Image (spheres, rainbow, N blue to C red):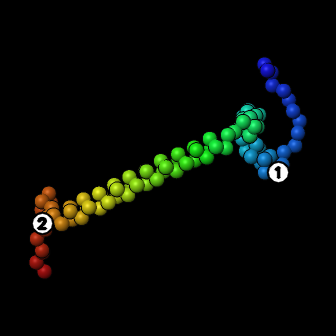
Amino acid sequence: MDRNIIFSFSLEWDSARIVHSVRNGKKSQMVSDAIYWYNNYNIQEIRNNILGLQRVINEKNSRIRELELTLSELSDRKSGQKRTDQPRLKPTDQ
């Protein structure tokens, strides 16, 4: 199809609000993409993508916990050492 075909139809309130929030010039494309996706999606592919994303999130969370523990250990070691880069202040006479 070389030309767009114009349709006239009503949308339910929630759908109309979503379409209305899309900037001008993008509404038709957004509705077209939604209709195409609705008719062509593969639920198993979506589930596989979600499982893959959950696996990546879990791996990243594990890595974050490892780094937090490492940082905590380094901080504990450093707090036990005397700092030689700052001169000690002598108490002032009162």
Q: Nearer the viewer, mark 2 or mark 1?
A: 1
Q: How many marks?
A: 2
Return the residue at label 2: 88
Height in image: 44 above or below 1?
below
Height in image: 24 above or below 47?
above
26 and 54: which is toward the camera: 54
Q: Position of residue 44 (x, y in %)?
A: 64, 43
Q: Which mark is residue 13?
A: 1
Relative to 82, 6 lies left or right: right
Q: Quadrant of the N terminus?
A: top right
Is residue 24 shown to the viewer in this render?
A: no
Q: Which of the 4 image quadrants contains residue 67?
A: bottom left
Q: Residue at 43% of width from left, 51% of height from top?
A: 59
Is residue 39 shown to the viewer in this render?
A: yes
Q: Which of the 4 image quadrants contains residue 21?
A: top right
Q: CA distance from mark 2 to mark 1?
A: 71 Å
Q: Which of the 4 image quadrants contains residue 78?
A: bottom left
Q: Quadrant of the C terminus?
A: bottom left
Amino acid type, residue under disc 1 in the picture: Trp
Q: Residue at 85% of width from left, 29% of height from top?
A: 6
Q: Residue at 76% of width from left, 43% of height from top?
A: 19
Height in image: 56 above or below 79?
above
Q: Position of residue 25 (x, y in %)?
A: 73, 32
Q: Position of residue 33 (x, y in %)?
A: 72, 35
Which structural element holds mark 1? helix
Relative to 53, 92 lies left or right: left
Q: Residue at 32% of width from left, 60% of height from top?
A: 69
